[in-house]
Image (spheres, rainbow, N blue to C red):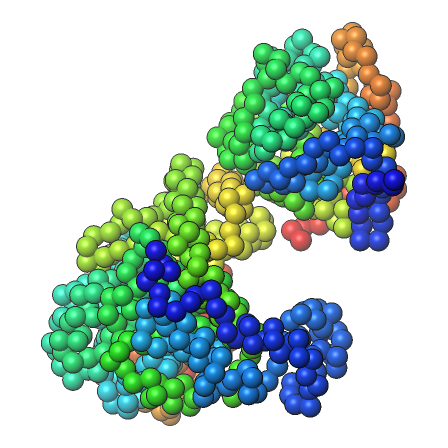
Amino acid sequence: MQTKRNRLDQRRAPIYEALENFRRMRVVPFDVPGHKRGRGNPELTAFLGQQCVGVDVNSMKPLDNLCHPVSVIKEAEELAADAFGAAHAFLMVGGTTSSVQSMVLTACKRGDEIILPRNVHRSVINALVLCGAIPVYVNPEVDNRLGISLGMCREQVAKAIAEHPNAVAVLVNNPTYYGICSDLRAIVKMAHDAGMLCLADEAHGTHFYFGGGLPVSAMAAGADMASVSMHKSGGSLTQSSLLLIGPNVHAGYVRQIINLTQTTSSSYLLMSSLDISRRNLALRGRQIFHQVADMAEYAREEINAVGGYYAFGKELVNGNSIFDFDTTKLSVHTLDIGLAGIEVYDILRDEYDIQIEFGDIGNILAYLSIGDRPQELERLVSALAEIRRHYQTDGTGLLSQEYIDPEVVISPQEAFYADKISLPLRETKGRVCSEFVMCYPPGIPILAPGERITEEILDYIEYAKNKGCSMTGPEDPEILHLNVLA
Amino acid sequence: MELWFSEFHTPDVKHSIRVNKHLYSKQSDYQRIDIFETPEFGRVLTLDGNVMLTERDEFIYDEMMTHVPMAVHKGIRDILVIGAGDGGVVRELTRYDRVKRIDLVEMDPMVVDACRAYLPSNACRMDDRRVHIYFENALRFIRRCEGEYDLIIVDSTDPFGPSEGLFTREFYGNCFNALKSDGIMVNQQGSPFYSEDARAMQRSHKRIADTFPISRVYQAHIPTYAAGYWLFGFASKKYHPLDDLDAESWEAENLYTRYYTTRLHKGCFYLPAFLEEMLREVEKKEAQ
C-alpha cells in the first residue's frame, strides 16, 4: 500500500549507495576529517569499528553537500519527501531541535505573534528567544485524573486566532510526549482561513506517516511544516531528523534559514542513517508499527491486570482535546500505587536495570519502537508488579498536576537579554523569570523567560527536585537561585 | 573426514566435540536448535551453538537440580519447572511418588518436540499424568501465581540469550511470591571460572540474596559446561540446605542415583576460597 502511493523507487538509498561506492574507490584522503578513515585514531576505531569511522568523511563532489544539495543528498531529500507525502524534505543533523527552530524562524520575524500550546518543547521557546517573536499560549486542557496536559481544543484555538488576527502561525504538538493529538485537520483549516501557517512538532510522530490505525500525520492533514524525529520512532541515529514542508512554503527560503545555524561539516553517519531508515520505513514501516502498536496494547492489558497502575490508551479519546491517541505509546499512571512517576522511573533503573524514557509527577513513559521484543516487555511488566508489591504507599503528600498556567509578562527574547539579578529560589515569588526551568526529559518548561514566578510554581520546582527529577535550564545548576528581571 | 562441533567458552577458549552425524537443525522463533550424534558424549543438544546437555553427562545436572531440594523439604508436592524443555529435570522429579503436580513452563515448543524425537532418555517422562506443559513466557506465567508451589526449579539457558529475563530481580521476586511460605527455589547459576560468566553469576546471586532470606550456592563437576565447573543456587524461605537435610528420609525413598548422594549433598555446599570471596563481595555490597 505504501509503495503504491510513492512516486519514486523507495528501494533506493542514494547517500548510502554513494558511500558504498566511495568506499570501493579507495580514495586517498588529503582532506578532513584528520583521523583519515580511523588510521590516525586507533583507539576510536577500535571502539566504534572500522566500518563506522571509514564513512565518517567530508562533503565532496561525489557525496554532495548538505548546505546546497545538488546530487545524492538532493535525491535522498526527494525520496524522503515522497515517502512522507511532503512537497520538500530537509535532512537535519542538529537534532529535531534544529528542525523546530528552523520551522519557527521560517514562520516568524521579530515582533510577530505565534499561537502555540504551553506544553511545547524547550526548542520552540528557544527559537522565540532567537528571533524575538511573541508567544500566544493556548492553554492545553488538563486531565484531572492523570494530571497531564492534553491537546488544544478547537474552540481555544479559534479564540486565540480571533483575539490575535495578526499572528503568523499556529504550532501544534502532533502528538504530545504522551501520545495525545489535537484535531490537526481542523486547526490547519482554521489557521489557513486566517492566513496563518500551521506548524507541527512531530518529534514523537514519525510513525504516523507509516502506520495503519495511527493518528493523522501533519503532511496528510495539510500542515505547512513539520519537524520529524527520525531518530526516535524512525530508527535513525541520535541527532538526525527531518524537516518537512508543504507546497505553501518556499523551499529555498527554508534552506537559507537552516544554513544560518547549521554546521557546514554535516556528518555522513547521520545523513546515511536517515537515508537507510527512510528506506526501511517506506518499505516495511506499516508492518513494523503494527507490531509496535500490538506490543503496546499487550503491555497495557498486562499492566492494568497487575492492579493499581493505569496504562492509558484510546479510551481517553474525547473528540477534541484528545482528538486521537497514539497507540504505540506506553504511558502508565502511577499515583494510585502511592508513587510519583519519577520514583517508579528511578526504582526501575536502580533496582531492576530497566531504563525508561521518563517519569514525571504522576506518570511514566516507556518508549516502544522498531527494536523491542516481547521478552523485554515481560520484564517491564513483571518489574512493575514487583514495585507495586514492595513500594506501594498510601500516597499522602503526592502532587498530581504537572501543568501550571503561565503568565507571560514580556517576550522570551526581551526577558532573556534583559538586565537581571540572581535571587534565592524562595525570594523570587512575583518576579519575572529570565531563564528556563524544566524537568528533562520531557523538557517542557515549568518556567520560560518572561513569565511570572508564583508560589505554586516554586512549590512545584521544590517538589520535583525532592522527588529526584533532573532539572535543567537555570544558570545555577543546583537551582537554589533563579535569574529574574532586575 | 573430520567433523567437529565447537563452542567458545570465552573468545579465547574453545571446546570441541567430534561429531558423527548432525541429526537435527532448526531455527525456532527464539533460537537455533541442533542435535548431534557424537562418539564421546552420545547425543548432544545445543541452543544457539551452546551445549545444553549431552547424554553422557546430563545426569549430573539433572540430579543436582532436583534431589538437593527434594532431600531438604519432605513436603514438596507442587512443583514449577521453568525451561527444561528436554525433560531431564521432569524425569528425575517423577520418580517421587509424593510429587502431585509438575507444571513445566517452556518458551519454545520446538525444543520439546526435538527432544521427544531425538533424546528419548531425557524426554521419557514428559507424558506422566502429573506433568502439565505450558508454552509461555515464564515471567508472564509466574506473575499470576501466588503461594502456589513448594519448589520452583529454574532450568534456564545462560543469561546472555533468550533467557535473560530469568536472571533478573523482577523474576526472582515473582518466584518468591509464587512459592508457599516454606518454598524453595533452585536455579542453575552458571560457572564462576571465566570472568564474564563469573560476573553474571555474581549479579544473579546478589539479586537472589536480596530476595530470599536463605540463599546458598552449591557446585558440581559437569565436563561439557564452561570450565567443567558448574554452580546452582538454593534459595529458600524457611529450610536451610544443610541444617534441614533429612538424609534418612531421602534414603528411604530408595532412588538409584549416579551422582547425587546425601554425603555429596553435605559436601557440595563447601566452596573454594575464591568463590566464597566472590559471593561475599555481592552479599555485602549495596546496589551496583
Q: Is residue A364 left or right of residue A135?
A: right
The spot of residue A254 in percent (x, y) is: 35, 85
Residue A24 shows up from this direction: yes
The spot of residue A300 in percent (x, y) is: 39, 44
The spot of residue A263 in percent (x, y) is: 50, 86
**B259 or A398, nearer to the observer:** B259
Q: Is residue A134 above or below residue A4?
A: below
Q: Is residue B30 above or below residue A99?
A: above
Give the residue displayed 48% in from the left and 55% down from the top.
A370
Quadrant where the image shows the C terminus of chain A: bottom left
Quadrant where the image shows the N terminus of chain A: bottom left
**A360 or A419, nearer to the observer:** A360
Residue B218 shows up from this direction: no
Give the residue displayed 19% in from the left and 68% down from the top.
A187
**B195 or B183, nearer to the observer:** B195
Q: Quadrant of residue A86?
A: bottom left
Total numbered circles:
0
Give the residue displayed 24% in from the left and 70% down from the top.
A222
Q: Is residue B287 above or below residue B239?
A: below
Give the residue displayed 55% in from the left and 82% down from the top.
A63
The spot of residue A456 in percent (x, y) is: 31, 67
Q: Residue furthest front?
A: B1
**B248 or A189, nearer to the observer:** A189
